[in-house]
Amino acid sequence: MPLLLDDAKRLVEQYVAVYNEKRLHSAIGYFTPQDMMARRQAEIHVARDGKLEQVRERRELAERPELPVLSKPLLSSKKTAA
């Protein structure tokens, strides 16, 4: 089945849209070209920082072992005679 000119145009338009609107580019700080043109870097950084903080908190809670409840203190303030 041959590729028609309209099909080729549609494919190129889809590629350009993804490239400019969805794909994060490492050379421009992992932003889309559309975000750069709209100068949304600060807004995106704030959102990313918030998400990173949530992940750090969840990870800390998941990795922290539960401390045992002790009936007696581990260290006594009284010294024993030798």
Image: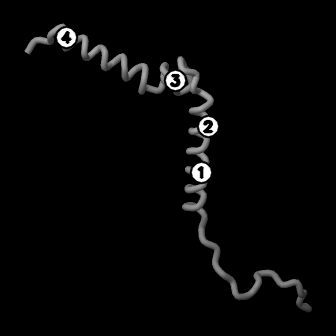
Pointer 4: what residue?
6
For residue 53, above or below residue 15:
below
Q: Earlier in the sequence, mark 4 or mark 1?
A: 4
SS at mark 2? Answer: helix
Pointer 3: what residue?
35
SS at mark 4? Answer: helix
Measured Cα–Cα span from mark 1 to mark 2: 15 Å
Q: Please, what is the three-letter code of the amino acid marked with disc 3? A: Asp
Q: Earlier in the sequence, mark 3 or mark 4?
A: 4
Estimate how packed mark 3 is, as few (under 14), some (14 to 19) or many (20 or more) residues with alpha carbons within 10 Å. Answer: some
Outermost residue on the top side: it is 5
Measured Cα–Cα span from mark 4 to mark 1: 48 Å
Q: Nearer the viewer, mark 4 or mark 1?
A: 4
Q: Position of residue 77 (x, y in %)?
A: 88, 84
In the drawing, what numbered circle is on residue 56?
1
Q: Quadrant where the N terminus lies?
A: top left
Residue at the image position 53 percent from the left and 17 percent from the top: 37
Q: Position of residue 4 (x, y in %)?
A: 15, 10
Measured Cα–Cα span from mark 3 to mark 2: 14 Å
Q: Earlier in the sequence, mark 1 or mark 2?
A: 2
Q: Please, what is the three-letter code of the amino acid marked with disc 2? A: Val
Q: Please, what is the three-letter code of the amino acid marked with disc 1? A: Arg
Pointer 2: what residue?
46
